[in-house]
Amino acid sequence: MIKEWVKSKKPDEEQLNQRLEEARLQLAKRQQMIKEKKLPVLVVMDGWGAAGKGSVLGRMIKNLDPRFFKTFTLTKASEEEKRRPFLYRYVSKIPEAGKFVFFDGSWMDEVTRQYLKEVISKEEYEKRLESIRRFERQLHDNGYLVVKFFFQIGQEEQKQRLKLLKKDKNTDWRVDKWDEWQNKHYDRCMEIYDKYLDATNQFIAPWYFVDSKNRKWAELQMTELLIQSIDIALQNVGSPVPILQNTFPLVKMPLLSEVSLDQTVADEEYRQELDKLQKRLSQLHNELYHKKIPVIIAYEGWDAAGKGGNIKRLAAALDPRGYEVHPIASPEPHEKSRHYLWRFWTRLPKDGHIAIFDRTWYGRVMVERLEGFCSENDWQRAYTEINEFEKELYDWGAVIIKFWVQIDKDTQLARFTDRQNTPEKQWKITDEDWRNREKWDQYEVAVNEMLQKTSTEFAPWYILESNDKHYARLKALRTVVDALEKRLHQKK
C-alpha cells in the first residue's frame, strides 16, 4: 500500500494556514455533533518513529473540549498487561458513546515489532492479524467509528530527526533503541508495514496515509480526513449491518425439553464425592498457577436454578488469591455506553488465575433480546461476535467452561415460593423474577438457539441438571476437574 500511495500536493503557506484554521474549527464542531449523536470515535495513529505523531496530536486536540476525549500513548505492554489477552489493553481503553479516544501507537506497532524482532512466529503473527480484523469489524458493527492514520517519512528524514532529538538533552529521551533499529532496518520494516497495512485495510476501518515531512501539513491532512470520516459516520448512525455466518465448528446440543431432570444423588455419596472433587480441584489450581493457564467459568441458567450454591462449592476449593467471582447485573451507565463485551473484557483473569462469571455476555441473546434492550440486528450478530470473543480467549490459552443450569418450571415455582415464605431468603426473590417466569416459553426458545449457535469445540456448553442441586454441584466439579486435567496434560 505504501509504495502505491500517491501523496497529495502540499498547498502554499498562506493556503495551508487558512485551511488549517478552518479545519480546527470544524473538528471542534464535529466534537459536539458526535456527543449529540452518541457516536464513539477511536482515532489510531501509527507510523515511523520520529514521524511527528505526538506533536500533531498535541496541536490537534487544543481546540477540543478536554472533557470529551482521552489520549493514550501505547508503546510496550506493562508486565501486568502481558498477563492478559493480546487485545485486552486496547479494548479496555475504547471510548464511551459520544467521545473521542486517540491512540498514539496501537496494535499495529505491537504485532509488527514483535514479528520483526522474532518474538512471535509467522503463524502467531497471522493469528493476531485475524484478531485485529475481527476487533475492528466488531467495533464498527457496534456503532464505533475507527479512523486509522499511518505517518510516513523517508529513511533519511527519519535519520535526521532522530539525530536532532538526541542532540538535545530535553528530547533525547524520546529516542529509544527501537527507533534506531527501525531506521537501520528501514527497508525490512517497510516491507512488513506494507503487508500489514494491506492485510488490515478494511472498508469499515481503512488506513489513511499522512505525509509527515512537514508537521503543519501533516496536521491538516489528518484533521480534514478525520472530519470527512466523522461526517460519513454521522450519516450512517443506527444503520443495520450484515449478519455474518458462523465459521467455527459447533458441538451439537439437545433442546432443553429433551434434557432429563430425574438424576439424584444420595446424601452420603454427595458428601464423599464433594470432598474428593474439591481436594482435586485445589491441587489443579496450584498447577494452573504454576503453568500460567487462565480459566474462565461461565454460569447461566434459570432463576432459582442453583447457580449461587454451585459457584460456592466450586470456589470453596480454590485459593482465594487466585480467583474472582463476578456477579453480573444490569450494566452501569459507563458500561452501557461502550461495546457490550467491554465490561467482560475488563473482568478477564490474569494468566494462572480463574474468573467465575455469575451471568455473562450471553445476556445479549437472552435478556437484551427479549426485553428489547438491543435491536434484532444487534442480537442476531452477537452469536458470531461471542464465538469470536471466546476464540480470542481460547487462542490466548484460556480454558473456557460454560454451564447452563437447568430446572423445570414446577421446581422453579416451588423454590420461588420457598424464598418468598422464608424471611432469611426473601432477598433472593424479586418482582423481576416473577415477570421473567411469565416469559418462560420465550426464554426457552432463546436459550435453545443460544446453545445451538454458541457451543463451539473450543468453548462448549455443559448442561447441569439441577432439580437435585447436589447432583448439579458434583457434575459441575467433575466437568471442571476433567477440563483442567485435560488441559494440563496437553501443556506437558
Image (cartoon, grey):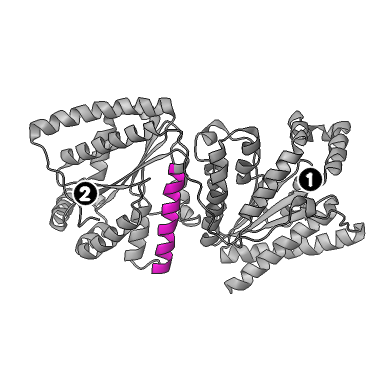
- Label 1 Cα crowd, 10 Å radius (few <14 / some 14-19 / many 20+): many
Numbered label attached to residue 387: none
Task: Tell me the kind of residue under disc 2.
Answer: Ala
Is residue 133 within the magenta segment? yes
Dominant secondary structure (helix, strand or loop) of the stretch shown in magenta: helix
Residue at the (63%, 73%) spot, across then down: 489
**x and y percentages locating residue 259 in the rendered image:** 79, 54
- Label 2 Cα crowd, 10 Å radius (few <14 / some 14-19 / many 20+): many
- Kindly identify which residue carries mark 2: 51
Is residue 100 within the magenta segment? no
Region rendered in magenta: 121-140
Q: In terms of image quadrants, where is residue 318? A: bottom right
**x and y percentages locating residue 18 in the rendered image:** 14, 28
- Kindly identify which residue carries mark 1: 305
Task: Tell me the kind of residue under disc 1.
Answer: Ala
Q: Is residue 85 something that shows in the picture?
A: yes
How far is the residue under mark 1 from the one under mark 2? 58 Å
Q: Nearer the viewer, residue 454 or 401?
A: 454
Residue at the (59%, 74%) spot, across then down: 492
**x and y percentages locating residue 130 in the rendered image:** 43, 58
Residue at the (61%, 33%) spot, across then down: 372
Q: Secondary structure at mark 1?
A: loop
